[in-house]
Amino acid sequence: MALLTDHTAIKNDIQYCGSVVSIMAAVHREDIQKQIQQDWANREYIEVITGSIKKITDFLNSFDMSCRSRIAVLNEKLTTLERRIEYLEACVTKGETLT
């Protein structure tokens, strides 16, 4: 009779251990799923930030090119004005009339 009781106790212990292992596996599976979901959320956030940085970079590059173009035009106009002033100064120095 004691052998039967020991056998039943062992069987109950095995079932209990199996239940514990099943619970631990379920908890582990849930943890992994949470980690995967968090990873996807992080990736989506990084994608949004990366897209925003790209838009800012594109704007700044466009702004830079626009400013450079406008500055080049102004530089040409200033150069033309400087040449005219130098010509007029030379005429005045020589005493020439502008007509």
Image: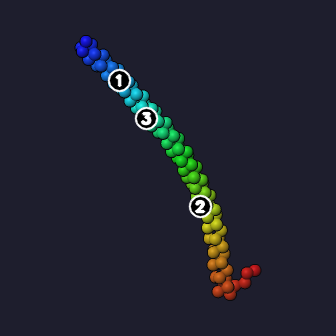
Spot occupied by residue 70 in the image (x, y as percentages of width and height): 64, 62
- Disc 3 marks a residue whose amino acid type is Asp
Around disc 2, counting alpha carbons within 10 Å, would you say few (fewer than 14), some (14 to 19), or many (20 or more)?
Answer: few
Q: Is mark 2 on a helix, strand or loop?
A: helix
Q: Name the residue under label 1.
A: 16
Instruction: Give me the C-alpha separation between circle 2 and circle 3.
Output: 55 Å
Name which of mark 2 and mark 3 comes first in the sequence: 3
Q: Is mark 3 on a helix, strand or loop?
A: helix
Spot occupied by residue 7 in the image (x, y as percentages of width and height): 27, 15
Specify whether residue 21 is in view. Answer: yes
Counting labels gives 3
Above or below, 89 relative to 54: below
- Disc 1 marks a residue whose amino acid type is Tyr
**Quadrant in the rendering for residue 90:** bottom right
**Quadrant of the snapshot with the N terminus:** top left
- Disc 2 marks a residue whose amino acid type is Arg
* Residue 31 circle label: 3
**Quadrant in the rendering for residue 85:** bottom right
Q: Are marks 1 and 2 in contact (CB under 8 Å)?
A: no
Q: Mark 2 points at which residue?
A: 68
Query: Which residue: 59% across, 61% down?
Result: 68
- The label nearer to you, 2 versus 3, is 3
Specify whether residue 25 is in view. Answer: no
Between residue 47 and residue 11, name the one nearer to us: 11
